[in-house]
Image: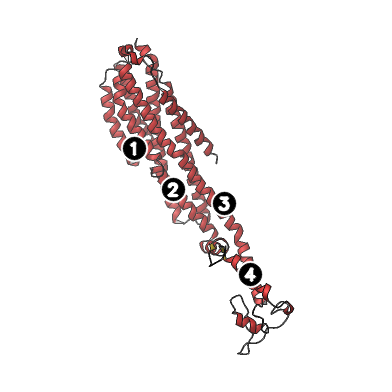
Amino acid sequence: MSGCATPDLRPFAAETAALAGSITAEQAEAAARFAQVKARVQARDAADTRVKQLSNEQASAADNAKAIEAVMTTAATYSDALADLAAQGETGAAAADTLAKALQGFSTALGIAFPLAGEIPAWAGKLTAELAQDVTRIQAQESLAAATKAADAAVAKIAKAVADIYRWPDGAQAMILDGLQKTEEGVLRDEVGKNRLAFYQAIAVARIQLPERTPQTRLEYFFGAIDDRLGQQDPAAGICGVTAAPAPGADGKPVNVGIGGSHERRAQASGGDPHCLGAQTVQGLQAVVALLAGIEPQYQAYTRDLAASRAWLQRRGSVGEPIAKAASAWAAAHHEIAVSLEQCGGMHALRRNCGNLNFGHLKLAVGRLRAIAARGENSAGQ
């Protein structure tokens, strides 16, 4: 009778494996991005303080990755053990011991990942101590149902550890990756030159609003002013300052007819035409256009790389947050199993309400996790 009363828990094991796969893909994404940004900084200046900063942050991310891998190895071992016990109809004290040993594997896996105890992330060390207490309670149980119920707290702690790392935007992984992306933005600005970038943006990108005028860039306003002057100057005057020599000023020296010259001084230089477009103005215009043309390719590359960097961080959020939710769903699925085993295990299976154990929520969680794993694998190539 006990074999008939124990549900098929293989979907729960598959759910755990899917969660582990998506986490592995995300850790690989973080490691690759750290290496990419650090190489970019070093290419400009190997002595840049951001190299050490990135190395430290990369080490923290790698430590979290190793600890999470130990967590998910334990979770997978536990889930497989639970599914195997259910499939074999093992429901006695031996089953409780098997589950306890599966959870004990966390401290072993953590010790392998971190040979020196001082390297272990604080959250992982705390989880080790908490799981040790749960293992003791599980070992004291006499049935699979009781052991699964006792293990429910341990599973919830494992799920919380994963969720705390991947919750977006305030999880540990999210904050590390957000800092990485902000560093990358700074590197991109430095590659163009902060002042050159600010100059180009101020002249050719930023739109300003003047009274009763359509918002335009400074460059557009400038060309508009030039067009207005050309339209209003005396067409018989030719190109002011080129076809006729500029008249001297009151001091007897040639009048400066540059872009900043007043209408009065331009009029003085052109024999009275206040709309004169002088040679120095043309030369100044040519210099500005040439300068902007030289910066434009760098600016376009900057905006392209900046957009790609922000999109990368957004993709991490689109995967990280579902991982956190999936971890919670995984724990909820285990709780449902624990309750069902308690209510319907062994001779309890003869109860009328145990005729058809419903694991619909578990199946839904499995599908969700498989989709997350697929997205993680796809994003690894972007």
Q: Nearer the viewer, mark 2 or mark 1?
A: 2
Q: Is residue 49 visible?
A: yes
Give the residue displayed 39% in from the left and 14% down from the top.
88
Spot occupied by residue 17 in the image (x, y as percentages of width and height) = 44, 28
**In which quadrant of the rendered image does the C terminus lie?**
top right
Q: Residue 124 shows which numbered tag?
A: 1
Q: Which residue is mark 2?
A: 178
- Real-space Cα distance between discs 4 and 3? 26 Å
* Rendered position, 174 above or below 292: above
Q: Which residue is mark 3?
A: 304
Give the residue displayed 27% in from the left and 22% down from the top.
139
What is the crowding at mark 4: few (fewer than 14 residues within 10 Å), some, or many (at least 20)?
few
What is the crowding at mark 2: few (fewer than 14 residues within 10 Å), some, or many (at least 20)?
some
Task: Please report whichever mark, 4 or 1, sits nearer to the chain's N-terminal start.
Answer: 1
* Rendered position, 288 above or below 99: below
Query: Residue flagged by tag 4: what amino acid is it?
Result: Ala
Query: Residue flagged by tag 3: what amino acid is it?
Result: Arg
Dot 1: element: helix
- Real-space Cα distance between discs 2 and 1? 22 Å
Q: Residue 287 shows which numbered tag?
A: 4
Q: Is residue 241 left or right of residue 104?
A: right
Task: Please report whichever mark, 2 or 4, sits nearer to the chain's N-terminal start.
Answer: 2
Q: Quadrant of residue 146?
A: top left
Spot occupied by residue 53 in the image (x, y as percentages of width and height) = 42, 52
